[in-house]
Amino acid sequence: MRVILKQDVKKVGKKGDIVNVADGYARNFLIARGLAVAETKKSLEILGEQKAEEAAEEARKEAAARETAAKMEKMILNFNVKSGAEGRVFGSVSTKQIVQELEKQGIKVDKRKILDTAPIQSLGITKVRMELYRNVIAEIRVRLIGSEG
């Protein structure tokens, strides 16, 4: 029997897949527990509509991420750090501090999305890359300004 999965089912398939399973397994397990529906013209139409909605949502999220990336390309985040006489930095700027500064600017980013995870320990401008969405990578400039002390 061919069924359309409503949820991911281990060793059978993922949500939205059309799979061929034994009649008893389909009726007594998958359909009975609400994990799948029988393949009919109506269920195929509904599946097509759901996939179209998901594709539109994906496109909307990607467009929003690209817009945010364009805004971030123009930004420079400034951090004041203590430094020695020769420009040597005491401490560093971490991904957590970068995320907090971005939130002050109105941009919400998960710190795990930052690709360059090493703490910044040099004065001047450093470019930091972060993945905002699948295949959307933004590059932001971080400036460390030293103050002797």
Image: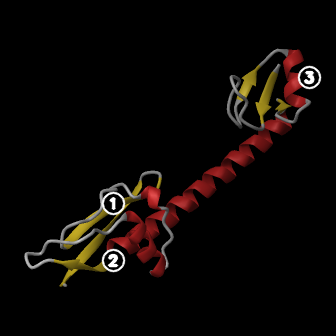
The residue lying at 28 percent from left, 71 percent from top is 141
* N-term-proximal mark, 2 vs 1: 2
Residue indicated by mark 2: 75
Label 2, secondary structure: give it.
loop
Q: Is residue 132 visible in this depiction of the protein?
A: no
Could you say where residue 25 lies in the image, as x and y percent from the top left? 85, 19
Q: Residues within 10 Å of mark 1 (few under 14, many from 20)?
A: some
Quarter assignment of residue 119:
bottom left
Quarter assignment of residue 51:
top right
Could you say where residue 118 lies in the image, as x and y percent from the top left? 30, 57
Q: Is residue 148 above or below residue 37?
A: below
Q: Is residue 91 above or below residue 8?
A: below
Quarter assignment of residue 6:
top right
Could you say where residue 95 lies in the image, as x and y percent from the top left? 38, 64
Residue indicated by mark 1: 129
Name the quadrant of the N terminus: top right
Q: What's the distance in space between the residues labelled 3 and 2, CA to CA? A: 58 Å
Label 1, secondary structure: give it.
strand
* Depth order, front residue of 96/139: 96
Could you say where residue 146 lies in the image, as x and y percent from the top left? 19, 80
The residue lying at 57 percent from left, 62 percent from top is 60
* N-term-proximal mark, 3 vs 1: 3
* Depth order, front residue of 133/77: 77
Q: What's the distance in space between the residues labelled 3 and 1, CA to CA? A: 50 Å
Q: Amino acid at mark 1?
A: Arg
Label 3, secondary structure: give it.
helix
* Depth order, front residue of 96/91: 91
* Depth order, front residue of 24/43: 24
Residue indicated by mark 3: 28
Dot 3 and dot 1 residues touching (CB under 8 Å):
no
